[in-house]
Amino acid sequence: MRKIANRIAGLALVLAGTSGMSVAQVRINDPGRVVERQAENRANRKIDQAVDKGFDSLEEGIGNIFKKKDKKAAETPAKTGAQGNAGGSGAQTEGPGNGAAGESAGAKPGKATLKSYSKFDFIPGAKIVAVEDFAQDAVGDFPAKWNTNSSGEVVTIEGTEGKWLMLGPEGVFYPEFVTALPENFTLEFRLATTSEFSFYTGFLRTIIAEVGTPAKEFTNWKWYDGGKKNGVEMGLHPKDAGGSQGIASFNVFGEDGGSLMKNEKSFPAFHVPEHNVVKVSVWRQKTRLRLYVDDFKVWDLPRAFDAARKYNFIAFSNHGYHEQANRYFISDLRLAVGAPDTRSKLVTEGKFSTTGIHFDVNSATIKPESYGTLKEIAAVLTENSTVKVKIIGHTDSDGDDAANLALSKKRSEAVRAALSADFGIDGSRMETDGKGETEPAAANTTPEGKAGNRRVEFVKL
């Protein structure tokens, strides 16, 4: 009886805490929508009663979608051969987009292909400066390199690779290792929600700002506007009331905290029954901002950033229903700086290396999110029709040496085939080779170093 009473009291507090913002979030006042909303709330209460034990133990999850593995087992993962290399490692060392999202992409109806990403023009920054896959954190803990005014913990999601940070309710989540953002950078991460995610839950907001003392001021970036200034805030929600569209919001805050620019639009929903997982890509070029969800370009704004600002802060903020059925998860965060200079480096300097060509785990299958990088390389080869190149695959040091070498060769051959078949580059202009782990570009002692070593190199012949 005490447990039931406590549960009822907890639900009452949740309803009391969210009732004041629900109307603003719904933004629809017709009677039909009110009836729909009440019906959903009633259904949620039924579900809540049925899974009461699930709220007492996160291991059970909601609908058995998100399961946490045994904490001790997660702290001592087994090595998985060569899958960690040339853009495809296991959960412990994988950089975002380089293999870890293979299962996630497959969960969506119809596996994406390079051709399906034909309008995807995102190109990652030239140098990887931060990678966060939560490999160093134990399942059940809040990650050591982050801060929050809420709660959260590292979990695993059944059917996906790697670890995820499950965000708690009503809070700001701040990676303390990001301290400087130049005028050209890219930010990538995977975003997931629970499958029963409610339309009435708030947006997940990605924040890029200039903050005087981030450790003290990060809490200003709560879901409401108080205290925000000198920053860009991008919000994503997986679905609208009908589940057919996602919702994206955008807001730029000035020196006085006032909104300088804002908008809201729909984009293809990422709500599906099995997994709600997407790749989010943010690209800053001086004042210009591009935001992609998978291959869809949500925003392309020429004056989003203030060129005079020294942006030094990235965070995530959320609000809404507090139930376990409505949670956001992030993983595989990757920050890279510098504008790619494919033309100059390949034609003038004779060599170009990229970490922007990604592969499925332990495979030579190229991920469709590599399209922008491949398209840029193909454009250089098309414009310089006499140039011939050698394509060389490289890996990090995880796994078996011989397997890494073989995998790097297969991946260089896959790149050659893609440039020929999908972009019309004559195959006779391209040779292939693989070096495995024998020529590292950085030490294999950090996630950033390993991610930099999983690369494809183009050498002018």
Image (spheres, rainbow, N blue to C red):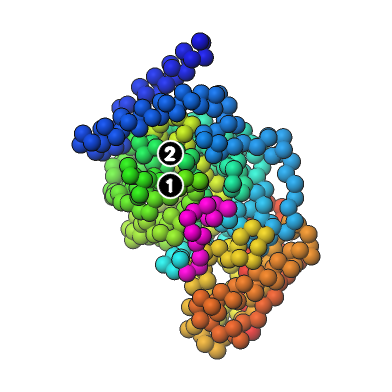
116 or 337, which is in the foreground? 116
Q: Which amino acid is tagged 1? A: His
Q: Pinpoint residue 379: horizontal percent, then vertical percent.
A: 48, 78
Asked if 107 appears above or below 428 in the picture, the reply is above
Q: Are the two marked residues, 1 and 2, in contact with CB atoms closer than 8 angstroms?
A: yes
Vertical comparison of 213 with 424: above or below: above
Residue 300 versus residue 184: which sits nearer the camera? 300
Circle 2: element type: loop
| Residue 182 coordinates in the image, percent (x, y) | 48, 56
Q: Is residue 105 magenta?
A: yes
Residue assigned mark 2: 197
Q: Residue flagged by tag 2: what amino acid is it?
A: Phe
Residue found at x 50% / y 46%: 274
Q: Quadrant of residue 222?
A: top left
Residue matched to label 1? 271
Within the image, what quadrant is residue 205 found in? top left
Q: Which residues are magenta?
A: 103-115
The answer to whether 174 appears left or right of 80 in the picture is left
